[in-house]
Amino acid sequence: MLKAVLFDMGNTLLDYHAGPSSDDEKDDKGLRAMAQRLATWGHPVSHELLLNEFYRPWVALFPKRKQEVREFDLVPLLSCAIPVEELNAEQIKRLLLDFHEPSALEAIMDDGTHDSLHRLKTSGIKIGMISNSAVPGYCHDRTLARLGLLSIIDFRLYSYDQGIRKPHRELFLRALKAADSTPETTVMIGDSWELDLAPACQLGLRVLQYHSPRRGKKTAFPVPPHLSLGQIETIPAAEGLLKHLI
């Protein structure tokens, strides 16, 4: 009996790379929004300073995030560019929301995603999300709320808040605990074999590969020897989830 479905976020539930702006353009808009916000608070900081002392060091950490399977606190990076000691926690949160806002505003979901998740939830199935994130989870919660998904997802585990990244097995174990489920009654859905499906398989979860109909079909992932071929499905569109899972 299926009790819980766990989703990846990026390139599965959401596409942050959509929209008219490139990823770099969105980040640049975010930096400029941060500078404007700081100016209104009496802390004039140039866009160039934020770019060189905060943004570029943050991007330089991305390979290390993957190597060490963990996330890095953004506040020490911010302190290189702005007087964080003069800001309270809510102001720092507001700055990071400003930085992420351009990406949040252009993020989209595939057709049928909302309806499919709603039907899963009304069927009594727990819906969870496990996402690697270089920014705090409240940034993504804002995106999910805008798209009408936040109230449908029962729990969300963001790597930034958890301190560890996929494919760390502990994230999946925490998700099972949050869902009050077992590997045998849980399905993991994601687009990455390395980050989403392989670690889930190792713990005994069933897995489903997600293919966005907008991005074209990928080569099917390998099937672990301890799972049957029938336990790996390709989902052509989110609206087909119930057909495959229930």
Image (cartoon, rainbow, N blue to C red):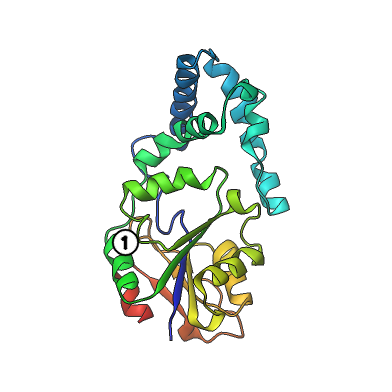
Residue 194 in the figure: left or right of residue 104: right
Q: Is residue 75 visible?
A: yes
Residue 94 in the figure: left or right of residue 115: right
Residue 167 found in image quarter: bottom right
Residue 160 in the image: state x and y as whole percent.
59, 48
Count of labels in the image: 1
Alpha-carbon neighbours of circle 1 within 10 Å: few (<14), some, or many (≥20)?
Answer: some
Given residues 50 and 227, the one toward you in this image is 50
Given residues 55 and 164, the one toward you in this image is 164
Residue 94 in the image: state x and y as whole percent.
47, 32
Residue at x-position 56% and y-position 79%: 183
Which residue in the structure is indicated by mark 1?
113
Residue 236 in the image: state x and y as whole percent.
34, 68
Q: Is the residue 207 above or below the residue 60 in the image?
A: below
- Quarter of the N terminus within the rendering: bottom left
Q: Is the residue 36 above or below the residue 62 in the image?
A: above
Q: Amino acid at mark 1?
A: Thr
Residue at x-position 32% and y-position 57%: 110
- Quarter of the C terminus within the rendering: bottom left
Given residues 179 and 80, the one toward you in this image is 179
Residue 161 in the figure: left or right of residue 150: right
Residue 111 found in image quarter: bottom left
